[in-house]
Structures are given as structure tokens and as C-alpha cells.
Image (cartoon, helix red, strand yellow):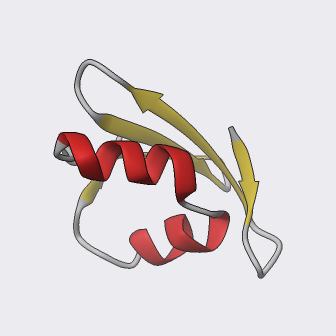
Amino acid sequence: MVLITGTGREIKVTPNFSKRTFTLRVDGTKYRTIQFNGKEFEQARLFWTGNDWEQFLKTDEYYKV
């Protein structure tokens, strides 16, 4: 899914159901989240907005691919 942040940034979010991770593509750069627990993964997949993912990228819970 492609989400737009409040600042107009485009974030493409792709879930990996078996690993409970997400791949994020932002401004030509690819990131992968660390593994979520089952409940967090479903909440992020269903309810997180572009702004939520933008805030997530300010944490250290992902790595550059």
C-alpha cells in the first residue's frame, strides 16, 4: 500500500506475513522493520497511517536493506 504523510512524503509499505515484518520504500531507499509480535503486526497493517510510519522511521526498530 502507498501512504502519504502529512508532509507529502510517499511511503510504500509491504507486509511480510510469515516473518511479521514490513518493507518500507521511502524516497528511493528501502528499509525493513524488525519483527513485530502478532497483535502489533496486525494493528500496524490495518490502522497505521503515513504519519505513523514516518514517526516509526525516527526509531531504531528498522534497518536499511
Residue 26 lies, in percent from the top left, at 61, 54
* Front residue of 42 and 32: 42
The residue lying at 72 percent from left, 54 percent from top is: 3
Left or right position of 23 against 33: right
User: Which quarter of the rendering shows the N terminus?
Assistant: top right
Left or right position of 24 against 33: right
Image quarter of residue 16: top left
The residue lying at 32 percent from left, 44 percent from top is: 41
Left or right position of 19 against 26: left
Residue 43 lies, in percent from the top left, at 41, 52
Q: Among all residues in the image, which is located at the extreme right? A: 8
The residue lying at 53 percent from left, 71 percent from top is: 52
Q: Is residue 64 shown to the viewer in this render? A: no
The residue lying at 26 percent from left, 18 percent from top is: 18
Image quarter of residue 51: bottom right
Residue 62 sits above or below residue 52 on the image:
above
